[in-house]
Each structure stands twice: as structure tokens, then as C-alpha cells.
Image (spheres, rainbow, N blue to C red):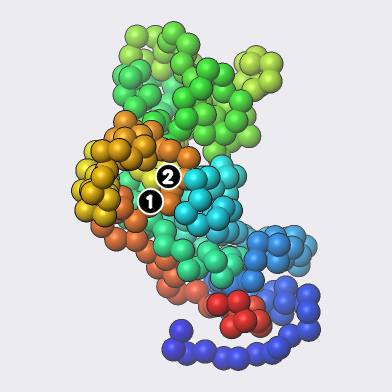
């Protein structure tokens, strides 16, 4: 941010109006850094009214205390990865709303976002066990009954999955190694709804990707930091391909390098909350 202009301070709560005008007079996308989630959520609603045809993305920080044994909520993780995926694959003009806490947090590199992506479709040849292994690698959680996003269950030759980008879960029926049918179903009644004939895309749903390379790097880094690693429940759970509660805190041990949100928005105009310095 070598080239910067200072405007303000602004009158409280008029920031969305100023940013809307600035956006319309510029050919660049905008990254707005607010003080907290409450502010940017409020601004999102105002932008939907002021700029109804503009894509507004939120990028929130993890909603837990640093180094606590609690994982970020599923909703926050899904929203973060959705935003990062859009930023990695599209150069469209848009507005991103984030917070001071979010920009200071290291995130997975852009190169990782699409590295595990795969697609399925009706009549496609796909080994049943391979599909299950791919879902686990992406971060899906195996359950007895699919009720919520990022869950999957197995019943004989039937695979139920709730992708993050769909409002209803899907039911995949295999015949040998061929996908015979794909239906949406109701997560409450478990009844089939409509058949799906288009391709379905699956991508990572957790910033921790437990593939062989990442796990080997994690073990190496963990052993260097914690000599008594054999007695660590975290170490042993990760080694069994299980993400422990709060395991996302060990993100830096899984990758050679991490990035920040700024690496995803290098050509954006950046606007700061007028009390930015007060909160850093």
C-alpha cells in the first residue's frame, strides 16, 4: 500500500454510501477492512440494497479463541473457503468485506484451493471406495445419517452427501462401479426429491488437507517442536487422518508456506475503517 489516499474521518454509518459511490466510479474491485464481524455483516446488508447487482463477499476470521481446543464453526469455514475459491478462479469486479483479525491470519496458498477438486456425473465410472476416500480428503465428515453440510454417509451401494454449495443433500446410487442415479433428497424425511443430470463439483471444505504429503510434513514439524510427541493426542489423531477439536490451530505445520488475504487481492483498491489504527 505505497500509494494511499486518506479520506475522512467519515460520519458513522455512512461508509457503505461512500464505498458504493467509489466502486461505481472505479474500474477496480474493493477490499474493505472493517473492525469486526458485526460491522461487515451490517454493511453487507446495506450493499445489497445500494448495489443489488454487485457481488459482495465476506471473509471472516475464525470464530474461536486462538490456541483453544475448539474448532472454528462449520459456517465460518465454509464461507471462508467459498470466498477464497471465487477469488482464485474469477477476476470479476466485486466488493470484499473483511476484518482486521482476518487480514492478520495466515491462510492456505492459492495453489491449494483447486488442487483436490473433482467432479462426478450420472453414468460415470468411479470406484465406490475411491469416492469415499476423496470425500474424507476434502474434509467431509462420515456420519450415520446426513443432516448437515459437509457430511456423508454410506448404506450399501448408496452414498449420501451434503455439498457445501447446495441447499439440499444428494443421494448417489451405484451399480457396481458406475454411478446409476443422482437425486436430491430431503434431510428431514430422507425422501428423494428431483433427479440431477448435471455434473457435480466437490472441493475442499477445511483449510487442513490431510493428504500424505501434508501429514508427513506435519509429523516432521510437530516432532521438531514437541519432543514428547508420542504422548500427544493431537499428533496421534492427525496420524489417523482425524482432525481433533481445535486442530486447525496447527495449520502452519501442514504447509511449507502460508499466505494472507492480500495474496488473493493484489489488484484491489483497499479501504480501511477510519479507526483502523485503534484496533491494530
Quadrant of the snapshot with the C terminus: bottom right
- Residue 16, horizontal then vertical, whole percent: 72, 73
- Residue 211, horizontal then vertical, whole percent: 29, 39
Horizontal arrangement in the rendering, residue 90 relative to residue 219 (left or right): right
Residue drawn at x 65%, y 66% is: 36
Q: Which residue is mark 2?
A: 247
As helix, strand or loop, the secondary structure at mark 2 comes to helix
Q: Which residue is mark 1?
A: 250
Q: Is residue 26 above or below residue 148?
A: below
Horizontal arrangement in the rendering, residue 109 relative to residue 15 (left or right): left
As helix, strand or loop, the secondary structure at mark 1 comes to helix
Residue drawn at x 45%, y 74% is: 267
The reply to whether residue 224 is visible in this rendering is: yes
Please identify the quarter of the rendering in which residue 270 is found.
bottom right
Query: What crowding class fits label 1: few (fewer than 14 Cα within 10 Å), some (14-19), or many (20 or more)?
Result: some
Foreground residue among 244 and 3 = 244
Residue drawn at x 42%, y 59% is: 107
Question: Real-space Cα distance between discs 2 and 1?
Answer: 6 Å
Q: Is residue 58 above or below residue 243?
A: below
The reply to whether residue 83 is visible in this rendering is: no
Cβ atoms under marks 2 and 1 closer than 8 Å:
yes
Foreground residue among 66 and 134 = 66
Horizontal arrangement in the rendering, residue 240 relative to residue 268 (left or right): left
Please identify the quarter of the rendering in which residue 130 is found.
top left
Amino acid at each position: 500500500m505505497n500509494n494511499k489516499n486518506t479520506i475522512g474521518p467519515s460520519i458513522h454509518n455512512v461508509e457503505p454510501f461512500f464505498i458504493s459511490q467509489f466502486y461505481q466510479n472505479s474500474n477496480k474491485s474493493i477490499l474493505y477492512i472493517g473492525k469486526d464481524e458485526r460491522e461487515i455483516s451490517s454493511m453487507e446488508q446495506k450493499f445489497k440494497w445500494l448495489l443489488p447487482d454487485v457481488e459482495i463477499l465476506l471473509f471472516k476470521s475464525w470464530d474461536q479463541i486462538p490456541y483453544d481446543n475448539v474448532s472454528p464453526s462449520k459456517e465460518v469455514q465454509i464461507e471462508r473457503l467459498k470466498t477464497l475459491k471465487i477469488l482464485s478462479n474469477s477476476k470479476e469486479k466485486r466488493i470484499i468485506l473483511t476484518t482486521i483479525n482476518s487480514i492478520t491470519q495466515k491462510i492456505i496458498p492459492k495453489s491449494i484451493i483447486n488442487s483436490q477438486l473433482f467432479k462426478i456425473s450420472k453414468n460415470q465410472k468411479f470406484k465406490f471406495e475411491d469416492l469415499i476416500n476423496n470425500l474424507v480428503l476434502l474434509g467431509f465428515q462420515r456420519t450415520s445419517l446426513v443432516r448437515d453440510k459437509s457430511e456423508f454417509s454410506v448404506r450399501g451401494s448408496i452414498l449420501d452427501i451434503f455439498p457445501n454449495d447446495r441447499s439440499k443433500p444428494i443421494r448417489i446410487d451405484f451399480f457396481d462401479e458406475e454411478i446409476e442415479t443422482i437425486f436430491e433428497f430431503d434431510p428431514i424425511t430422507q425422501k428423494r426429491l428431483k433427479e440431477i443430470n448435471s455434473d457435480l463439483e466437490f472441493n475442499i471444505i477445511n483449510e487442513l488437507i490431510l493428504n500424505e504429503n501434508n501429514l508427513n510434513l506435519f509429523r516432521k514439524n510437530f516432532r521438531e517442536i514437541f519432543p514428547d510427541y508420542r504422548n500427544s493426542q493431537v499428533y496421534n489423531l492427525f496420524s489417523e487422518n482425524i482432525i481433533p477439536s481445535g486442530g486447525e490451530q496447527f495449520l502452519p505445520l501442514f504447509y511449507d508456506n502460508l499466505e494472507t488475504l492480500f495474496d488473493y487481492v493484489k489488484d484491489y483498491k483497499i479501504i480501511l475503517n477510519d479507526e483502523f489504527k485503534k484496533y491494530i
